[in-house]
Amino acid sequence: MKIYKVDGTLVSTNRIAMMEHKPLLVVREKEGGTPMVAVDPIGCKEGDWVLCCGSSAARDATGVKGYPSDLTIVGIIDKWGDAADGNSSS
Amino acid sequence: MKIYKVDGTLVSTNRIAMMEHKPLLVVREKEGGTPMVAVDPIGCKEGDWVLCCGSSAARDATGVKGYPSDLTIVGIIDKWGDAADGNSSS
Amino acid sequence: MKIYKVDGTLVSTNRIAMMEHKPLLVVREKEGGTPMVAVDPIGCKEGDWVLCCGSSAARDATGVKGYPSDLTIVGIIDKWGDAADGNSSS
Amino acid sequence: MKIYKVDGTLVSTNRIAMMEHKPLLVVREKEGGTPMVAVDPIGCKEGDWVLCCGSSAARDATGVKGYPSDLTIVGIIDKWGDAADGNSSS
Amino acid sequence: MKIYKVDGTLVSTNRIAMMEHKPLLVVREKEGGTPMVAVDPIGCKEGDWVLCCGSSAARDATGVKGYPSDLTIVGIIDKWGDAADGNSSS
């Protein structure tokens, strides 16, 4: 899994039916990093540090079997060991 | 999922039968970035910012179970939170 | 999917039985790029620009269900929209 | 599989139910490298060099069929051949 | 598939039971490149140039259905077309 910071929401009204209305969030590994889009089955808010799961596991992790996701938030991070690099949540 | 901009179409007449006649689009993460090719089950046009799903989820997302895709457009982006980096659609 | 140029053949006589005798081609994203090896179910020749599918979809795309491939040629490219970067076939 | 060094633990109390209470460890390919998060079904401690499996295989490797992981520790490394680059465990 | 050179063996006695006792080899794309670890169902020796399969196909390629691998050697390379870059086997 990778660690991302929630950067904001993404609106896509014209989407395939299989995506339903699940919330999509823009997340980044670091400030100014490439924006990725993750499905949010938890209810995160901007600024949260989150744990995202990719690969085929991202599908079931949404809570809907076979959902078309390749990146899904699986947890909000309380704390992780490496505060020194300025990325840890507080 | 990743965010791409639609750059144009791709023609491949000599393709494996499993690919059928679904439209294929050239997409890029940014101007001048590496061209990727995505299956388009929605009907996008050049210049659209789109959301693409990779991994095994790209297959069913085409609307055809087990379709041979590793990158499929799953939504056209209306708006996303990070206009500051010049990538957001308007 | 990614766009590659066919660079030549690869010979591997000592291979696992599941690979059978399908042709394997060395392909590159660009001149001097990292060589990748793709299964060729179509019959490409050196210099062809091809469309390759990775991920789990690469397996069935070979035409043999469950074939051990992570990169399979799924089409020969006739033309794609971005001739300006010198990669398009003609 | 990739080789990582265990850097510490990660706490995420608000996680999806499928993740249960399995321990999550922050691992890095090298000092100062990008932090990745792996599920630990073995019981590693900080400083251990470990072997991690990604892709869909990461799921069953946790010991729970279909677990939502894309990176799972599958072994603690005793020794590997390349001590010269300063990464081998001792 | 990718081309790697076998660099040596890797010893991991404390591993998950699903990994059994299959040999694990350290492989690299080039001299000094990032070490990767591949399952070897063929019997390679140091210095061999090999073809490795990743993604979900790496699992069955080991010869054991559902084996937890994301990188498996599927062939020893006799020869490939691109001797000019100094990577081809001889």
Image (spheres, coloured by chain):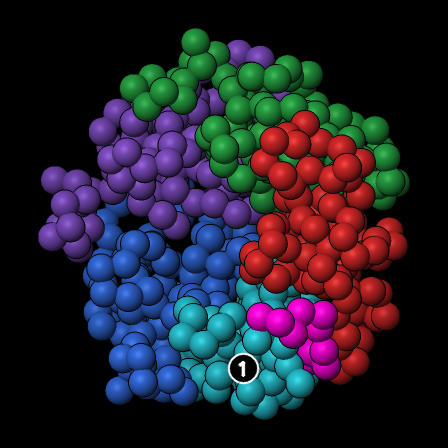
Chain colours: A purple, B green, C red, D blue, E cyan
Q: Could you tell me which chain the residue with mark 1 belongs to?
A: E
Asked whether C44 or A31 is in front, the reply is C44
> Residue lying furthest top in this view?
B90
Please report the residue visible at 27 percent of the width from the left and 79 percent of the height from the top: D86
Q: Is residue E60 left or right of residue D53?
A: right
Is any part of residue B38 visible from this angle? no
The image quarter in which residue C45 lies: bottom right
- Find residue A85 and report its horizontal and vertical position in percent: 15, 50
The image quarter in which residue A52 lies: top left
Magenta residues span: E72-85
Please report the residue visible at 12 percent of the width from the left and 40 percent of the height from the top: A90
Residue E10 drawn above or below residue E16: below
Please report the residue visible at 59 percent of the width from the left and 36 percent of the height from the top: C85
Q: Is residue D58 left or right of residue D11?
A: right
Residue A21 drawn above or below residue D10: above
The image quarter in which residue E10 lies: bottom left
Residue D6 drawn above or below residue D83: above
Q: Residues within 10 Å of mark 1 (few under 14, many from 20)?
A: many
Which residue carries the number 1 mark?
Answer: E6
Asked whether D18 or B45 is in front, the reply is B45
Is any part of residue E85 visible from this angle? yes
- Find residue E75 and report its horizontal and vertical position in percent: 70, 76
Please state which amino acid type lies under the numbered disc 1.
Val
Element class at badge 1: strand
Q: Is residue D15 magenta?
A: no
- Find residue D18 and report its horizontal and vertical position in percent: 44, 45
- Find residue C34 and report its horizontal and vertical position in percent: 56, 60
Q: Is residue E80 magenta?
A: yes
Please report the residue visible at 43 percent of the width from the left and 57 percent of the height from the top: D71
The quarter of the image holding the C terminus of chain D is bottom left
> How many marks overall?
1
